[in-house]
Amino acid sequence: MANEGRGDHEEPGSHNNRNNRRMARVVEWVVIALAVILAVLVVFFVREYLNLRREQILNAREASIDHVLKGHGPLTASDVDIIQPWMTFDYLNRIFVLPADYLQTALPVTDTHYPHLSITSYARDTNEASAAALTNVQTAIKNYFAQEGTGNSSSSATSPSNASLGFPTGAVQGSI
């Protein structure tokens, strides 16, 4: 009883209060560390995005297609060099004005996602290299125009070359 007034005795629950304060400090430091990491990542990704834009890697795909389609009618067999692995069969059917099921039958494509299937996905499904699948698609489109007798219409004079689209001459476009 003599010790009651001197503070040598801990009140019940004071140990829990200390642990709670310690845990709150740890949580604060973890939140601060996560916020700093997030800020660093945002800065890194923004810088990389800007670098890709400056090097014209990010917008090369859109620019190449826009360049071809401006002032140009439907694409023909002479335009197959603009086909990229990211393109879907639906997109190819529209820009080359192909029947909806032509490429599905010509290649043949068995994936149920057709025509919303990219050439890259088609290559993966058929265990082909992306460049080989790209060449097969280009050949199928050329064959379609050869059968239709419209393979090299007058639009071939306005059809851009790989170099004018920003692709290196002789390069496989799928590598972009």
Image (cartoon, grey):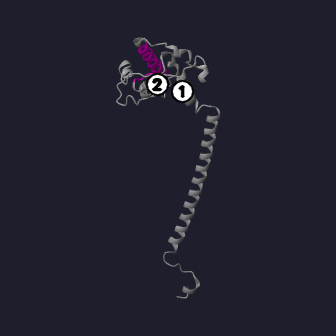
Q: Residue at x 59, y 84 (%)?
A: 6
Residue 68 to residue 40: above or below: above
* Magenta segment main secondary structure: helix
The reply, left or right, for residue 1 in relation to residue 103 is: right
How many marks are shown on the rendered structure? Answer: 2
- Residue under label 1: 65
* Res 166 → quadrant: top right
Residue type highlighted by circle 1:
Ile
Residue under the image location 62 percent in, 47 percent down: 40
Residue situated in front as seen by the camera: 175 or 116: 116
Q: Give yes or no for contact between labels 2 and 1 (Cβ–Cβ under 8 Å).
A: yes
Per the rendered image, the range of residues in magenta is 126-145
Q: Residue at x 65, y 34 (%)?
A: 54
Nearer-the-camera pick, 111 or 157: 157
- Residue farthest bottom in this picture: 2
Q: Is residue 57 visible?
A: yes
Give above or below for 10 relative to 60. below
Task: Residue under label 2, please give it.
Answer: 95
Which quarter of the figure has residue 51?
Answer: top right
Going by the numbered disc 2, the residue's amino acid type is Ile
In the rendered image, residue 26, in percent from the top left (x then y), is placed at: 56, 61
In the image: residue 113, left or right of residue 86: left
- Please provide percent x and percent y for residue 147: 40, 12
Closer to the camera in the image, 48 or 40: 48
